[in-house]
Amino acid sequence: MKYVNDSIKKIDSEALLKGKGVYTDDLAPRDALWIKVVRSPHASAKISNIDDRLTRKVPGVEMVLTYKDLQRIPFTRAGQCYPELSPYDKFILDEYVRHVGDDVAIIVAENQKSAEMGAKRLKVSYEILDPVLDYRKAEGHATLVHPEEDNFIPVDFVGYDRKKNLACDIGFEVGEIKEALKESEVVIQKTYESQAQAQAMMETQRAYSYEDEYGRLVVVSSTQIPFHVRRTLARALDMPMSKIRVIKPRIGGGFGSKQSIHAEFYPALITKLTGKPSKIVYSRKDVFTGTTSRHKMQFDITLGATKEGKILGIEMNALSDTGAYGEHANTTVGAAGKKVLTLYNKVKACSFKGKAVYTNNLPGGALRGFGVTQGTFALESAVNELAEVLKIDPVKLREMNMINKGETTPIYNIITKGAGPEPIYMDSCELEACVEKGKELFGWENRKNQIEKEKSSLRKKGKARGTGMAIAQQGSGLPNIDMAGATIKLNDDGFFTLLVGATDIGTGSDTILSQIAAETLDVSTDKINIHASDTDVSPFDSGAYASSTTYTSGNAVIEACKKMNALIKEYGSKVLEEKIEDISFQRGNIQSTSGKEISLEEFSNKITYSMLHQQLTATGSFVPKKAAPPYMAGFAEVEVDLDTGKVEVLDFVGVVDCGTAINPVLAQVQTEGGIVQGLGMALFEEVKVSSTGKLKSNSFMEYKIPTRKDICRIQVKLIEGHDETGPYGAKSIGEVVINTVPPAIVEAIYQAVGVRIRTLPATPEKVWHGMDANKG
Amino acid sequence: MKINVKINGKEKALEIAPDDYLSEVLRREGHLGVKKGCDTGSCGVCTIHVDDTAVLSCGMLAAKADGKTVTTIEGVQEKAERIRYELGKRGVDQCGYCAPGTIMSILYLEKVVKDPTEEEINRYMKGNYCRCSGYVGQLEAVKSYLEGQKHEVCE
């Protein structure tokens, strides 16, 4: 491999580091109308009156829109392939508001200040309704979050029941779980809860729109999903999809926040109505109150095992708070079982039930890990508790029970769309190697002994230390669902244009896909000009989510480039006047076995200008056929302050199997970033809501994300693996990297001070109260 | 109202509103490397230098810049070449949105703290959030940059 498995610099690096104007708001027309959304102060209310007289008097205000002005069309904001598994329960504006921050009215003005002043002066009267805020009581609650009759879901297999506040009710069972638990000598039953976490990408949601020279609507957006944006806008605005073009420039981070469609509706609507360019830039408060966060989930877990430590049965019941809207509700809670129970394939039986309920809280949405993070926290915490009960080392308990290379589980057949009864083997699983290497790097045994030795001296300083670990997996795209296309074009002078719909959101996927193209065409990376993504020009790609870009889009690039190689040989044989089977294309040269040779530059100039007159273009498509999960083992050491309960993570070792790392440095940074995001989730990040549904954490003053001062020593190791279905053996890396962090850290806290944190985050208060209770 | 301000070495007379923040005015003037990430002076992506001090431009009224010297990322392109190299080769630019502010903070740190320890680097730059990189590689980049600068000075 010449160009993959090489840590080249990101191809957009210079532009980004120089601060060039390459993001959405940098590119917006200077004369664009400013849009401001008025948001609800109530968790549940019916709008009884809107008085816009004062707003209209504000100089510069051009337009005020309320639900009365808009066509009533339900849609989902979830960016998923059609038909979405999310209910069509949202309107651009509605007479009901369902969470604090829900959209009430749209103010359009010449500039930002007028729009904001106009928004402040809008007088809205509400009939305040009783909100449903406790998700444990939401199912069958007397108050319906969605009383409207015209909401529906385009599929019939997710257990959607609006009249019970149920966004989904799903599950699966392998074997007889009751039997397996009955047979078990040791059974533990625990409840865990993972919090709502904010994506907190640095660039907020934003979009601008204009009418082009053909009268079509162009929407430029900071999105992970341009093609889903186009389809959903067409529906919501009642426009033909052919009249909409969506362009994605550079994106200032996503983490799932931009896998839902939020800001795009407003400028698209305003430009459609006025013909003028318009834009919206979400304030940080808009992001916190008006978009999504990680679904809060509760898990009841029952584990059954033999005394020797063989896990016989796992029962996992999940309840997810999807908040006011059901975007990504079914898929996240489903993933909490489907991509978590697969870790333990040696059980006799396992079962999963997952419900997502509507409440009047902030809507749940996509966030790195997408349900798997929540499920892994719960199951891995339970496995750590089981190890304690069985008095078995947690690493050994994993080694006895976890999935190994070449093994399978019937769950893969259940979760893979279109799979038959044939077992699906995990030939590329290097989990065992991850655990082994992690144990070694961390010094699992030694470190425990060392902590034991230093225990009393640490205690004198008011500190205690402990260690913990966890394992995890994720997916690599969604088999038989999410597809990617790639088109490669040979230009005169012998360079290529690579068109992909894949969306680089800062991960470096443009660079990685260029490396894959270079490898397949056997030309240097600087001969590849990538263009992504623009729904008018780019081939379809479901988008940057489900850890799919390297794997799914990468395979599409290989497919396209293989076809290009064949075309170059075909036309090369004509130019060199040799038989096609005697032609080879290597290192940028077309050669015949008889010794004739032409460079790609000369060849492309010839077929463009002087003979044959051919434009060579090839397109490849790819959809994953089976799961190609990446795996990770994470090890943490923490120090707890015995007086305050404050936890400091001292060290985290993460060992990842992502198959071949196309760009090892970028894979390493993904891992480091994921670990730190997991650290925030484990210790302090939390979207907090008051007893009336008001968001208490609506800015970075109240919502803390990890800073440079909060991080610890982080060691990352990428295991050398190879998945034969992946591009040059690659699997994904974007999401798996967050999953082990919370369970490993809470276990380390337990080992340090004997406090079990079963509700995230592990704040000083919770730890202190736990220590206090232990004192009796 | 009118202010006179020197931006990246050029004297400018700007017509502003009294409640305009400096970040908005700079962006309006085409300095698009000045980003905005929060409304509370928390995230650091709008960091610039005013009279050689690192400042959050989203929290400073433009009127207060009257008579002052303002430097944005656009004004330090040459100076920051090695910082770009160190960040870029470690892939810790990632989405890049925080990069201009981070670079402005690195330059300020270099100016005010001689031979900073890791602890000092992290303390000085703690107000520059990055959600992508996990900071590990960025710390390495800063250390390597400062180490390199020492040799540069000696030579």
Image: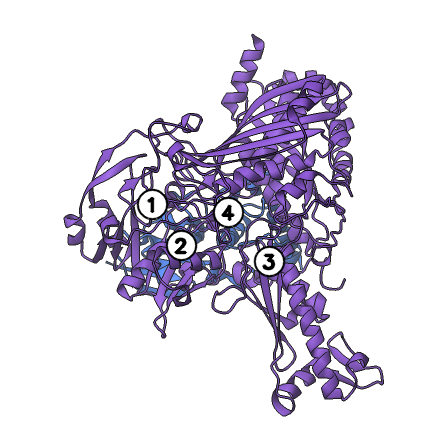
Chain colours: A purple, B blue
Q: Please tell me whether residue A641 is drawn above or below residue A102 in the rendered image.
A: above
Badges 2 and 3, same chain: yes
Image quadrant containing the N terminus of chain A: bottom right
Task: Tell me if label 1 and label 4 are in contact, CB under 8 Å.
Answer: no
Label 4 lies in what chain? A
Find residue A100 and report its horizontal and vertical position in percent.
33, 37
Report how far apart the C-alphas of labels 4 and 3 lie in the structure.
Answer: 16 Å
The alpha-carbon separation of the residues under discs 2 and 4 comes to 15 Å
Residue A150's tag is 1
Residue highlighted by disc 4: A256
Q: Position of residue A538 (x, y in %)?
A: 53, 67
Chain of the residue under label 2 = A
Marks 4 and 3 belong to one chain: yes
Considering only order in the chain, which callout, 1 or 3, is on the residue closer to the N terminus? 1
Residue A645, which numbered label?
A: none
N-terminal label among 2 and 3:
2
Q: Residue at x 42, y 31 (%)?
A: A688
Give the mark, 1 or 2, whose residue is nearer the N terminus.
1
Q: Element under label 4? A: loop
Q: Residue furthest right?
A: A594
Same subunit, tags 2 and 4:
yes
Work out how far the residue at label 3 is from the one at label 1, CA to CA, in angstroms: 40 Å
Give the Cα distance between marks 2 and 3: 21 Å
Q: Is residue A561 above or below residue A776?
A: below
C-alpha separation, residue under disc 1 versus residue under disc 2:
29 Å
Label 1 chain ID: A
Identify the secondary structure beneath mark 1: loop
Badge 3 amino acid:
Ser
Q: Are marks 2 and 4 in contact (CB under 8 Å)?
A: no
Specify the label residue A206 is tagged with: 2
Q: Camera-side residue: A670 or A181?
A: A181
Q: Which mark is residue A509?
A: 3
